[in-house]
C-alpha cells in the first residue's frame, strides 16, 4: 500500500472488509504536512484500530470516551496555547477529533457544541454510518426514516425508523464557525479538498462524511463506493460546504436518480419495497426533493 496513505494510520486494523473508515481517516490526515494529535470517540474506528496490545495509529492518539472527543480536543488546544504562552512549544500540532454519528449527533453533541462555541482550534470529523455500529446496529439520530435497525426494527406493525435524521449541518452551522462541509467517502478528491480547507481554518471546523456500512446497511462488501455514489446521485447526501456562512454545492447530478436506486441496494430498506410500504418510499422521495430545494435556495439567497 502507498506509504503516504499509511504513514498515519497503518494497515492491519480490524475494520470490516469494504469499510470506508480507513479511507476517510487517511484522506483527512493525508491533507496536512503538520504534526497532528488525534482524539477519537469510542466507536468502530477506535475499537478496530486499538486492539490491545496493538495500535494502528502512527500519530499521537487519545481514545476519548463515547461522548467527549470534542472536549478532549478542546483540552489539547488549551494545553498547546498554555505551552505556547510560556515559550515551551516548539511546533503547534493540528488537532483532529474523529467521532461516529452516535458519538456526534447524539451523545457527544454537548461536548461538540461547547468546543465549537468556545472557538477551539480543531477539526471535528464525523464519519456517519447512520447507526450505532460497534454495539451491533442500533438506531441513532442520523439513521434515515424507514431504515430497519436493531432498536427500531421493521416488521408486520412497523416500517423501521419513524423519525427523520437530525440536520447536524444546520446545528453545527448555528455555532457560527467559519468552515463546515458535507462529504462522502465515495468522493475522496472532494473530501481531500474539504479537509485541506478545514485544516487551514483558524478556529473550529467540521466535516460530516458519509460512510456506507456493509453491516448495518446490508450490502455486499464490494459495493461501498457504488452505494456511496448513489447516495449523492439521488440527492440523498448532497456534497456541499458552508464557508463564512456562504453555501456552495460541490456536485450537482446531471440527472437526479430516483431514491429507489439508492434504497434497493441495501437490506435495511428491503421491507420498503413491500406493497404496503410503497408510500414510505414516496415520502422519502418528497423529503429528499424538499431538502435539495431548500439547499439550492440557501445557495441562491446569498
Ligand atoms: C456513555 C456510554 N454509553 C454507551 C456506550 C456504548 N457505546 C460505545 S460505542 C457506541 C456506539 C457508537 O456509535 P457511533 O458513534 O455511531 O460509532 P460507530 O460504532 O457506528 O462507528 C455505544 C452505544 C458507551 N461506551 N458509553
Ligand atoms: S460495522 Fe460498518 S462502520 Fe463498523 S467497521 Fe464494519 S463496515 Fe465499518
Ligand atoms: Mg455510527
Image (tube, rainbow, N blue to C red):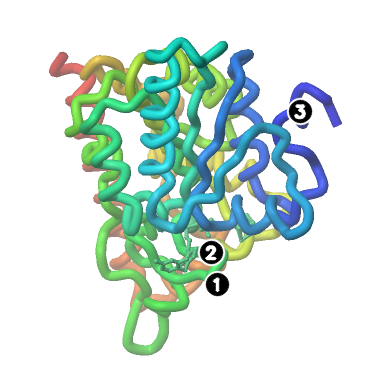
Residue positioned 52% across, 56% down in the render: 42
Tell me if mark 3 has few (under 14), some (14-19) or many (20+) residues whose alpha carbon lies within 10 angstroms of its own. some
Image position, residue 139 (x, y; %): 40, 68
Q: Residue furthest bottom?
A: 156
Queried on whether the Cβ of the residue with tag 3 lies below 8 angstroms from ligand 2, the answer reads no
Question: Where the N terminus falls, by quadrant?
Answer: top right
Earlier residue among tags 1 and 3: 3
Q: Is residue 148 left or right of residue 301?
A: right
Q: Element type at marker 2? A: loop
Mark 2 — residue?
A: 133
Q: Quadrant of residue 292?
A: top left
The span from disc 2 to disc 3 (Cα, nearest Å) is 26 Å
Question: Where the C terminus falls, by quadrant?
Answer: top left
Does 93 appear above or below 130? above
Tell me if mark 1 has few (under 14), some (14-19) or many (20+) residues whose alpha carbon lies within 10 angstroms of its own. few
The span from disc 1 to disc 3 (Cα, nearest Å) is 30 Å
Q: Tell which quarter ligand 2 is in.
A: bottom right
**Res. 181 in view:** no
Mark 1 — residue?
A: 136
State the residue in front, 295 or 252: 295
Circles 2 and 1, Cβ within 8 Å, touching? The answer is yes
**Res. 11 in view:** yes
Tell me if mark 2 has few (under 14), some (14-19) or many (20+) residues whose alpha carbon lies within 10 angstroms of its own. some
Q: Quadrant of residue 25?
A: top right
Residue positioned 28% across, 19% down in the render: 178
Image position, residue 12 (x, y; %): 82, 48
Q: Element type at marker 1? A: loop
Image position, residue 51 (x, y; %): 72, 58
Mark 3 — residue?
A: 7
State the residue in front, 205 or 121: 121
Amino acid at each position: 500500500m502507498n506509504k503516504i496513505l499509511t504513514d498515519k494510520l497503518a494497515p492491519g486494523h480490524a475494520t470490516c472488509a469494504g469499510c470506508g473508515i480507513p479511507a476517510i481517516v487517511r484522506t483527512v490526515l493525508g491533507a496536512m504536512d503538520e504534526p497532528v494529535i488525534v482524539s477519537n470517540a469510542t466507536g468502530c474506528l477506535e475499537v478496530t484500530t486499538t486492539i490491545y496490545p496493538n495500535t494502528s495509529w502512527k500519530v499521537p492518539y487519545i481514545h476519548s470516551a463515547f461522548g467527549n472527543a470534542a472536549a478532549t480536543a478542546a483540552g489539547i488546544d488549551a494545553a498547546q496555547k498554555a505551552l505556547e504562552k510560556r515559550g515551551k512549544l516548539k511546533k503547534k500540532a493540528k488537532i483532529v477529533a474523529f467521532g461516529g454519528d452516535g458519538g456526534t449527533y447524539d451523545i457527544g453533541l454537548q461536548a461538540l457544541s461547547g468546543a465549537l462555541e468556545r472557538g477551539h482550534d480543531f477539526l471535528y470529523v464525523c464519519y456517519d454510518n447512520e447507526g450505532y455500529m460497534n454495539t451491533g446496529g442500533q438506531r441513532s439520530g442520523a439513521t434515515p426514516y424507514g431504515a430497519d435497525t436493531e432498536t427500531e426494527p421493521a416488521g408486520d406493525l412497523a416500517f423501521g425508523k419513524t423519525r427523520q435524521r437530525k440536520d447536524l449541518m444546520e446545528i453545527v452551522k448555528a455555532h457560527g464557525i467559519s468552515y463546515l462541509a458535507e462529504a462522502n467517502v465515495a468522493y475522496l478528491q472532494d473530501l481531500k479538498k474539504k479537509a485541506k480547507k478545514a485544516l487551514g481554518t483558524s478556529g473550529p471546523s467540521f466535516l460530516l462524511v458519509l460512510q456506507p456500512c456493509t453491516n448495518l446497511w446490508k450490502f455486499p462488501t464490494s459495493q461501498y463506493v457504488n452505494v456511496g455514489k448513489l447516495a449523492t446521485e439521488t440527492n440523498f447526501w448532497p456534497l456541499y460546504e458552508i464557508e463564512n456562512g456562504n453555501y456552495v454545492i460541490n456536485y450537482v447530478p446531471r440527472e437526479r436518480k430516483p431514491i429507489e436506486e439508492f434504497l434497493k441496494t441495501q437490506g435495511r430498506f428491503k421491507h420498503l419495497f413491500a406493497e404496503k410500504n410503497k408510500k414510505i418510499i414516496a415520502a422519502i422521495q418528497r423529503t429528499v426533493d424538499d431538502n435539495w430545494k431548500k439547499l439550492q435556495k440557501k445557495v441562491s439567497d446569498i
